[in-house]
Structure formats: C-alpha cells, structure tokens
Image (spheres, helix red, strand yellow):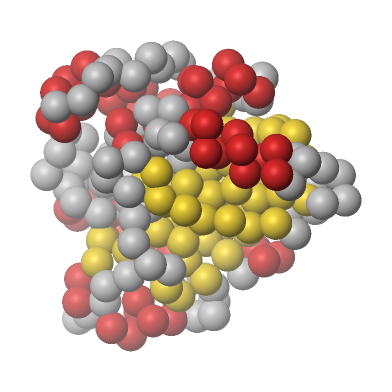
Amino acid sequence: MILETFPVGMLQCNCTILGDETTGEAMVIDPGDNIPQIVARLEKHRLKLKQIVVTHAHIDHVGGALKLKQQTGAPIFLNQNDLPLLEMMEMQAGWLGTATPEVAPPDASADDHLVVGLERYPATVLHTPGHTPGSICLHFAPLNLLVAGDTLFAGSIGRTDLPGGDYGKILRSIRDRLLPLPDETQVIPGHGPATTIGEERDSNPFLQG
C-alpha cells in the first residue's frame, strides 16, 4: 500500500494519495491545489488515478479537483449538500484574495454509507455535517484509518462561522459518527498533524464534558 499525505495550497490543506501497488490504481482525497505536484507523485509510483474524493466544497480542498480530473479522467465524488458552496467559488476566492479556480458539479454524490476507494482498500463515507452541510469523513475500516476533512483536528474541530457551518451539528457528527470508532483509529485531518480517535476522545477540549 502507498499512503502519502502532504500539504497543498496557501492554507496547507492535507491532500492524501492512497495507492495499490498490485493493481496500480490510486485515489486522491482533497486535491485543493498544486496539481502538478500531485500528478508527479502519482507518476513516481506508476499509479493510475481511479477516483477523486473531496471531503467538502471549501476552495482549499476542492480548488484543484477539476484540473486533476481533466488531466487524469478520474471522476470526482463530493456530497451533494455542498453544491451551494461549490457555486460560491468566486466568493470563496475573494475571502483569500486569490484567483477563482474552475469548478464543476461532481460526477457522483459522496452520500452517507457510500463505499469509495480501491478494491483492496475500500472506505465508507460518513456524512458529518457541521463544518459545511456536506462535510464527509472517509473510514477505511480494514486500515484503522479515518480521513476526517475539516470535521476533526488534533486538539480541535472544524470552524463553523462560515456559510453553512453549524456548531451543534459538528459536535453531534463527531460524537455520533467518529467517537464510536476504535481508539486506535488513525486520523488524518484536513490540516495539521495526524492524531487518533482515542487521543481526541481523551484530550480534545471541544469534546470534554
């Protein structure tokens, strides 16, 4: 298995490549920017991109998805509840003072319980609204791995002060969908260092009491 997570774009979004050396197939999660770097890593490992999954439609996570699709032919999965945010891309670019990336509706909605990923490394979509209405996490149960987008961070949670954010919903999403996972589950958040479910259950200040 090939698993690489690295920051892309001005907000240092964590982009993840998961590859299967046996089949030569890969998926990319949250290609927010720096598409040449992502393509170069795929080529280095001789991987063909099978799937692009975006955890939510904020510019730093979705900004490069269409460009990556255009270069590789891989379909984009994004939860349909975030389509209004996709349509606000010019406004989102204005928040950051950057150029507006070209975006388009996804090829399929990353709905709750949908199985995505690779044949040997499947992931179940967990719909975790709160940071955005369509925020999702990807649970790779056989790998004890959660790609959490901007729902859960090491020692923190996703911000809820942007359009569509809801503090009560993000806490419910974390408590109902993420904390029941095994303590040893490795968590790759949308920004910053990795953590585990157990560490966040025990010490995340937003989840105490």
The residue lying at 25 percent from left, 54 percent from top is: 158
Taking the image as shown, residue 139 lies to the left or right of residue 103, namely right
> What residue occupies the far bottom of the structure in this picture?
202
Q: Is residue 27 visible?
A: no
Q: Does residue 183 sit above or below 167 in this rendering?
A: below
Q: Position of residue 204 (x, y in %)?
A: 26, 76
Q: Does residue 189 sit above or below 54 in this rendering?
A: below
Q: Does residue 139 sit above or below 27 in this rendering?
A: below
The residue lying at 78 percent from left, 50 percent from top is: 20
Taking the image as shown, residue 49 lies to the left or right of residue 87, namely right
Q: Position of residue 90 (x, y in %)?
A: 22, 17
Q: Position of residue 76 (x, y in %)?
A: 56, 26
Q: Does residue 66 sit above or below 144 in this rendering?
A: above
Q: Quadrant of residue 56?
A: top left
Taking the image as shown, residue 66 lies to the left or right of residue 129, namely right
Name the image quarter holding the C terminus.
bottom left
The residue lying at 82 percent from left, 51 percent from top is: 21
- The residue lying toward the viewer, choosing from 102 and 144, is 102
Q: Is residue 205 visible?
A: yes
Q: Quadrant of residue 23?
A: top right
